[in-house]
Amino acid sequence: MKNLIDILDLSKEEISSLIKTADDIISNPEKYREKCRYKKLATLFFEPSTRTRLSFEAAMMELGGNVLGFSEAQSSSASKGESVSDTVKVVSCYADIIAMRHPKEGAPRVAAQRASVPIINAGDGGHNHPTQTLADLLTIYREKGTFTGLNIGLCGDLKFGRTVHSLINAMSRYSGIRFTLISPEELKIPDYVKHDVMDRQGIPYVETRDLQEVMPQLDILYMTRVQRERFFNEADYIRLKDSYVLTPQKLEHAKSDLCIMHPLPRVNEISVSVDDDPRACYFKQVLYGKYMRMALILKLLEVD
């Protein structure tokens, strides 16, 4: 595998291998401190990011490598009209591997066709975010100990939430999975995700607007923010942004081993009073993302 554009680019066996490597990095970080010495990662972020960009940079630095790149389109030649294709061909001359975020769906796939080094999709519009899904998978594995037999609740913006779409694709390959899709009507999961993934594979799911009703059934609750940047109409955003706010009171009937996840950033969809609940896993998720990105960089660079 030369690139990671979609989580389905990885087989179940490859995901298991990445998780094994990430676990080993967590247990034996000193083994990996020079693995990417003299290697360079370019971070091409045409859209703002905190966690994903810094996670990639920290991952490469902890492997002994170096980082170059830009954090917004306006600080690159894209502001002068340079195409994605030309940008990645140029940056391929400077770096050994590229992590790229772009607001347009499919841009990283175009980049992968033109670059001469591995491309990692760090998020493309409302489409895919495969390395966030790797972080999610390591979180689920370490917190639940299995990928099978889980009822996964996905709550909030399921229409534009690329992390949601990628996680459904990834988890659909494991047995006994059920999805509970919790959203307002305007932010329901796209039909193509339902039909192409869940319906086609016979995966059971329910759609509801009522988080409280389904809370006792959930093994995982994956909260998402309503994304202001995906709305063309400010009034629609304001009307929908507080559709779901998770509070300690709403968790009173949840399972004692519920795993609460969030790709972050949050706005106010999880109250800060939930942060100290032992079931809150979203800051662990951030850390696990760094370890999975370290494992992925090693795999794509074919470093033993």
Image (cartoon, grey):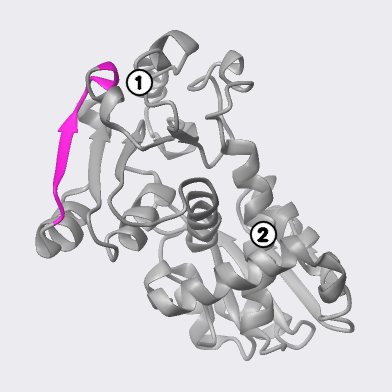
Give x and y (percent) for residue 150.
30, 47
Question: Looking at the image, which is closer to me, 34 or 76?
Answer: 34
- Please give the name of the residue rendered at 82% of the width and 81% of the height, measured from the top-left corner: 35
Q: Earlier in the sequence, mark 2 or mark 1?
A: 2
| Callout 1 amino acid | Leu
Point out which mark residue 257 bears. none
Q: Mark 2 falls on what kind of element? A: helix
- Please give the name of the residue rendered at 84% of the width and 75% of the height, measured from the top-left corner: 31
Point out which mark residue 79 bears. 2
**Quadrant the C terminus occupies:** bottom right
Q: Residues within 10 Å of mark 2 (few under 14, many from 20)?
A: few
* CB-based contact (under 8 Å), mark 2 and mark 1: no
In terms of image quadrants, where is residue 159? top left
Q: What residue range appears in magenta?
A: 203-212
- Label 1 sits on residue: 240
Q: Is residue 208 magenta?
A: yes
Q: Is residue 236 above or below residue 94?
A: above
Q: Is residue 228 magenta?
A: no
Q: Is residue 144 above or below residue 237?
A: below
| Callout 2 amino acid | Ser
Residue 80 seen in the current view: no
Q: CA distance from mark 2 to mark 1?
A: 32 Å
Give x and y (percent) for residue 79.
67, 59
- Please give the name of the residue rendered at 14% of the width and 64% of the height, measured from the top-left corner: 201
Question: Looking at the image, which is closer to me, 287 or 50?
Answer: 287
Using residue 57 as the reference point, say whether residue 22 is left or right of it.
Answer: left
Give x and y (percent) for residue 104.
45, 59
Question: Looking at the image, which is closer to me, 175 or 223?
Answer: 175
In terms of image quadrants, where is residue 27? bottom right
Residue 227 seen in the current view: yes
